[in-house]
Image (cartoon, rainbow, N blue to C red):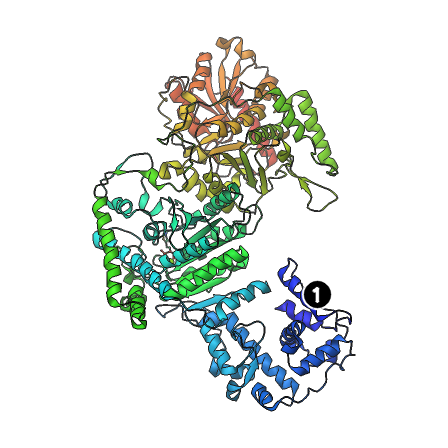
């Protein structure tokens, strides 16, 4: 708006040689192209002050006319035609206007009556244009959106100045209602007419914007998109449906309504979070799916909360009804693992023929936790992955639909985080259709105290998504907006929101009494006729169906339900695997078990290491200028390769490069991961002379390699981690990693960790191999940025600390891994990091992997690995034993210090300084979970005369101590005590004072090497 005004103020005559045609082309190009600017078409030389009617308020109108004139000079009034011609021909300021030739009598009267004055003509047209615009901007405020007619939407009491009675507001009066006005090009209400009487204009605008649909779109800063929406809602006669469409709609309403009624009849005391009050959700989703299938979509991934979930499973995804009904039988026995949390949380995957389009379509509903909206980014990640694997770069074949409750949509921040992913190159799914079940209540809380925005959907405006509010008691209007939403997505590949304004007939669940808290609303709801009944009556009156047909349709569906119910009683066993949202065909054997129980060697040949090392230290494209500092880094890498050693970054390179070469896709995402927070990675090289020219050497490893995706993310943890988890769900054959900027930031994604990553397999039988890289270490940087909170991850391991696992020696490691809920490692060497990344893919099952990654070790001269530790035959070391002088005389060793991660280097330095290399052994537990009981036992047996110390740099109530201590005790059968050397308990993860940090460090190192430290203690 502002831009249009300013450009018109700059109106200057077009340079003479330019033809109107070329101007029009320029305009069209500007509208359709990426650069949406009007500047090139404007080259007027005269000041606006010389043409008094070209002031700010008339400028919109004049601009519209000018565009229309460019396209067709006859489309504007003769006087304007002359003005624009004169202006174009370079007439001096003030001279371009000429009195218009007299109009034909009839025409003149019809247009604006006796109109001697062009200024009045302009003003009246401007008024009409403003009126049109008022409807477009604010018509939704007065649309009849609320079936209960008690709408709680707060528009700050700003009156909407539209309607036949409010024309004075625009400087018009009642006598103008029958005058004919030319319609601006920003409206389509005229259909094929370009002029209409004002009364008709208003009536048509009321039809378009103030009935059951409220369109919110004028905030979109793209003219083409606004025009597209206008024509979808303004064209006369748009809301007409064929008989067949109406009957299909009725049949869908019957299914939706009778399904809930059936459940209510059979299981009246069960919670089902029914859909009553928003039954049109089912036809809404089906319309979106039909239309999208028509547009070529083959797979739809859906995420939704509790409300109406069973109905969606039954009537949209088409899960067999008996499979749903049997979930209400508490005597079902579980046939497989999983918590059996079927009804409200488990997902579903189903391929079927879409009856309307006769095409195959795969529908999946993602399993989700109670945590509202948490599944949103997960759905997006999975959608992105499916698009990626089928080469669908535009989102034409795979799409997502997200359902929301009104309270959750407004309240949960992850909604905003997910919207912000929607247009980022490495995260876009090319448009999501959001459907809000806006029952105007969240549990017992009404919107007036639940949100500060007018609508629950306002968050979507941040990405310029159009919002179609619709009265859910008008199923035809619902169907219409859903069709438009699907077309919008297919046309612009951008997000869109359908806001189904409805009510909730029962309490939050069927056991709740809503009258406690919403007495007036529920008095109204009790009076409310059901939407099916209302729609059926409408169609019967119209003659679209007979009452008998309607009743037959009901009886038919009731019978289907009854028969399914009878079948469900035979169901004795619950197969949770039938409720998987992402099958991994071919990855498991027929019984869903791993194909083998061995982990192959994760090492590489010398040649492979050399080759990847070479790529890591070179620029594999011509004429590419990298930064001088980076040249030095690459030279350093080349030197390391020459010496057959790796630092941390090179170890990671070796793991990624080799997996890519072997055909595994790798996706590394997180804040600043391309360079690496600590400037150590540099996976994307930037040409210093050419903007946006980049090179990713990792994609130049081998001709048939898998692609490498490395992407800096938005500054979000919850959204991005959820997204990557979803990406990792789609296929077991990809290494998907999310790196936190610093490990402590993971807690803003805690919900994804707690609800999905940690218990995902146990709850939903779905394995996931996502890797979390969490920089961690006490380095005197203060309480922030220090701790990735290992204690929290360790506390959530499903392993019994008090029981020594009963596995054979050969299978010990792999069986432990298979049984665990996640793997937690803190590697102290690049080689071990390299191995654990490769093992993640080479092992025959998938588990989440949490890696506490180093900061100072990235450049620590001792934290390097020799190629020998990465060669074929080598593997990940769960525990790295002491290989120094202690090995020669183990009996003489007085103490064995167990530790993990970076503190190892501090311990070895201190030991050396104290000359205790023969008396104290140091063992590194690299894999914390599953705990390497077997290997720890080897160490404790090796040093029978040593006392056992756990040393950590974290505070005592943090880090690993509480996790490790009982396991060490179990390992030695509680025959030896386990002592602690580390910082004392504290509330904050680290001191903010560097000097205090160093004092603390020295103090616990003193304890670790003081052989009398624990004497007399028990
Ligand atoms: C993150 C989160 N916080 C709180 C809850 C508890 N809770 C369950 S449903 C609900 C109300 C949801 O309201 P709305 O989003 O409008 O959905 P509706 O139940 O009305 O369909 C709440 C607060 C939850 N499930 N998730
Ligand atoms: Mg609600």
- Residue at image coords 72%, 41%: 687
Q: Report the side of 570 relative to 449 (left or right).
A: left
* Residue position marked by numbered label 1 in the rendering: 39
Q: Report the side of 66 relative to 471 (left or right).
A: right
In the rendered image of this protein, does residue 528 appear above or below residue 689?
Answer: below
In the rendered image of this protein, does residue 831 appear above or below residue 57?
Answer: above
- Residue at image coords 52%, 71%: 136
Count the numbered circles shown: 1
Looking at the rendering, which quadrant does residue 38 occupy?
A: bottom right
In the rendered image of this protein, does residue 456 appear above or below residue 1008?
Answer: below
Q: Which element carries disc 1, helix, strand or loop? A: helix
Q: Is residue 244 visible?
A: yes
Q: Report the side of 328 relative to 405 (left or right).
A: left
Please name whichever residue, 704 or 917, is drawn nearer the observer in this view of the structure: 704
Q: Is residue 864 visible?
A: no
Looking at the rendering, which quadrant does residue 146 occupy?
A: bottom left
Position of residue 890 measured from the top left corner of the image (x, y, whole percent): 50, 10
In the rendered image of this protein, does residue 317 appear above or below residue 649?
Answer: below
Looking at the rendering, which quadrant does residue 761 occupy?
A: top left
Please name whichever residue, 730 or 861, is drawn nearer the observer in this view of the structure: 730
Question: Mark 1, residues whose alpha carbon is within 10 Å: few (<14), some, or many (≥20)?
Answer: few
């Amino acid at each position: 708006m502002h831009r249009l005004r300013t450009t018109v103020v700059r109106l200057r005559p077009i340079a003479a040689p330019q033809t109107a045609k070329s101007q029009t082309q320029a305009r069209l190009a500007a509208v359709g192209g990426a650069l949406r600017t009007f500047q090139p078409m404007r080259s007027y030389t005269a000041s606006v002050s010389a043409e008094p009617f070209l002031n700010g308020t008339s400028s919109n109108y004049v601009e519209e006319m000018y565009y229309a004139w460019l396209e067709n000079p006859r489309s504007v009034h003769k006087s304007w035609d002359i003005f624009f011609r004169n202006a174009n021909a370079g007439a001096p300021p003030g001279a371009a206007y000429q009195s218009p030739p007299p109009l034909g009598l009839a025409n003149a009267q019809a247009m604006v009556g006796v109109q001697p004055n062009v200024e009045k003509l302009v003003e009246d047209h401007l008024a009409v244009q403003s009126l049109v615009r008022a409807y477009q901007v604010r018509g939704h405020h007065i649309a009849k959106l609320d079936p209960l007619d008690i709408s709680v939407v707060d528009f700050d009491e700003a009156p909407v100045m539209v309607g036949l009675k409010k024309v004075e507001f625009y400087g018009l009066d009642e006598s103008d209602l029958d005058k004919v006005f030319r319609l601006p090009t920003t409206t389509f209400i005229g259909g094929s007419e370009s002029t209409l009487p004002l009364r008709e204009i208003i009536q048509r605008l009321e039809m378009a914007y103030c009935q059951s649909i409220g369109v919110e779109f004028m905030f979109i800063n793209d003219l083409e998109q606004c025009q597209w929406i206008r024509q979808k809602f303004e064209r006369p006669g748009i809301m007409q449906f064929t008989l067949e469409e109406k009957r299909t709609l009725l049949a869908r309403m019957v299914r939706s309504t009778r399904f809930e009624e059936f459940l209510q009849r059979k299981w009246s005391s069960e919670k089902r979070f029914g859909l009553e009050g928003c039954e049109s959700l089912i036809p809404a989703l089906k319309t979106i799916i039909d239309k999208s299938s028509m547009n070529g979509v083959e797979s739809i991934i859906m995420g939704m909360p509790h409300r109406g979930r069973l109905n969606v499973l039954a009537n949209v995804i088409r899960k067999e009804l008996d499979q749903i009904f049997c979930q209400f039988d508490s005597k079902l026995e579980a046939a497989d693992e999983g918590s059996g949390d079927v009804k409200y949380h488990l997902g579903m995957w189903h391929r079927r023929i879409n009856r309307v389009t006769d095409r195959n379509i795969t529908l999946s509903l993602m399993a989700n936790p109670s945590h509202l909206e948490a599944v949103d980014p997960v759905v997006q990640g999975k959608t992105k992955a499916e698009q990626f694997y089928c080469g669908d770069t535009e989102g034409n074949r795979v799409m997502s639909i997200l359902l929301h409750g009104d309270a959750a949509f407004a309240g949960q921040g992850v909604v905003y985080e997910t919207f912000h992913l929607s247009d980022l190159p490495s995260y876009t799914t090319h448009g999501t259709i959001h459907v809000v079940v806006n029952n105007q209540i969240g549990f017992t809380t009404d919107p007036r105290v639940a949100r500060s925005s007018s609508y629950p959907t306002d968050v979507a405006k941040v990405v310029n998504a159009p919002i179609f509010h619709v009265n859910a008691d008008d199923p035809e209007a619902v169907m219409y907006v859903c069709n438009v939403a699907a077309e919008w997505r297919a046309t612009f590949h951008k997000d869109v929101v359908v806001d189904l304004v409805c009510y909730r007939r029962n309490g939050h669940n069927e056991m709740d009494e809503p009258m406690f808290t919403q007495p007036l609303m529920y008095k109204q709801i009790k009076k409310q006729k059901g939407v099916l009944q209302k729609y059926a009556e409408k169609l019967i009156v119209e003659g679209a169906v007979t009452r008998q047909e309607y009743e037959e349709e009901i009886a038919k569906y009731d019978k289907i339900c009854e028969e399914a119910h009878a079948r469900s009683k035979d169901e004795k066993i619950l197969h949770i695997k039938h409720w998987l949202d992402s099958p991994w065909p071919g990855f498991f054997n027929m019984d869903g078990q791993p194909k083998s129980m061995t982990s192959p060697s994760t090492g590489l040949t010398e040649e492979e290491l050399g080759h990847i090392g070479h790529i890591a230290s070179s620029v594999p494209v011509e004429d590419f200028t990298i930064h001088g500092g980076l040249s030095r880094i690459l030279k350093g890498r080349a030197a390391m390769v020459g010496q057959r050693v790796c630092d941390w970054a090179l170890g990671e390179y070796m793991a990624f490069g080799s997996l890519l070469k072997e055909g595994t896709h790798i996706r590394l995402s997180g804040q600043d991961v391309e360079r690496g927070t600590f400037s150590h990675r540099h996976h994307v090289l930037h040409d210093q002379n050419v903007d946006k020219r980049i090179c990713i050497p990792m994609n130049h490893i081998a001709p048939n390699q898998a692609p490498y995706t490395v992407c800096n993310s938005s500054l979000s943890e919850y959204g991005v981690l959820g997204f990557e988890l979803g990406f990792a769900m789609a296929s077991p054959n990809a290494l998907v990693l999310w790196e936190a900027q610093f490990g402590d930031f993971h807690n803003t994604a805690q919900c994804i960790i707690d609800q999905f990553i940690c218990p995902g397999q146990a709850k939903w039988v779905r394995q996931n191999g996502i890797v979390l890289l969490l920089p961690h270490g006490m380095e005197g940087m203060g309480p922030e940025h220090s701790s990735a909170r290992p204690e929290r991850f360790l506390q959530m391991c499903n392993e019994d600390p008090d029981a020594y696992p009963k596995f054979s020696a050969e299978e010990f490691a792999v069986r432990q891994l298979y049984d665990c809920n996640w793997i937690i490692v803190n590697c102290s060497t690049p080689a071990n990091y390299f191995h654990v990344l490769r093992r993640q893919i080479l092992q025959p099952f998938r588990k989440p992997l949490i890696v506490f990654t180093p900061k100072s070790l990235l450049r620590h001269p001792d934290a390097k690995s020799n190629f020998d530790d990465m060669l074929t035959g080598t593997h990940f070391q769960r525990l790295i034993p002491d290989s120094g002088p202690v090995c020669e005389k183990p009996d003489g060793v007085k103490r064995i210090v167990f530790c993990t991660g970076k503190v190892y280097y501090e311990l070895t330095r201190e030991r050396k300084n104290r000359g205790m290399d023969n008396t104290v052994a140091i063992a590194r537990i690299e894999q914390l979970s599953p705990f390497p009981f077997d290997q720890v036992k080897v160490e404790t047996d090796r040093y029978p005369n040593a006392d056992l110390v756990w040393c950590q740099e974290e505070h005592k109530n943090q880090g690993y101590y509480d996790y490790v201590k009982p396991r060490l005790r179990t390992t030695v059968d509680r025959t030896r005590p386990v002592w602690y050397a580390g910082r004392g308990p504290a509330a904050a993860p680290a001191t903010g004072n560097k000097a205090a940090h160093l004092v603390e460090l020295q103090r616990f190192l003193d304890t670790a090497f003081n052989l009398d430290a624990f004497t007399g203690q028990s």
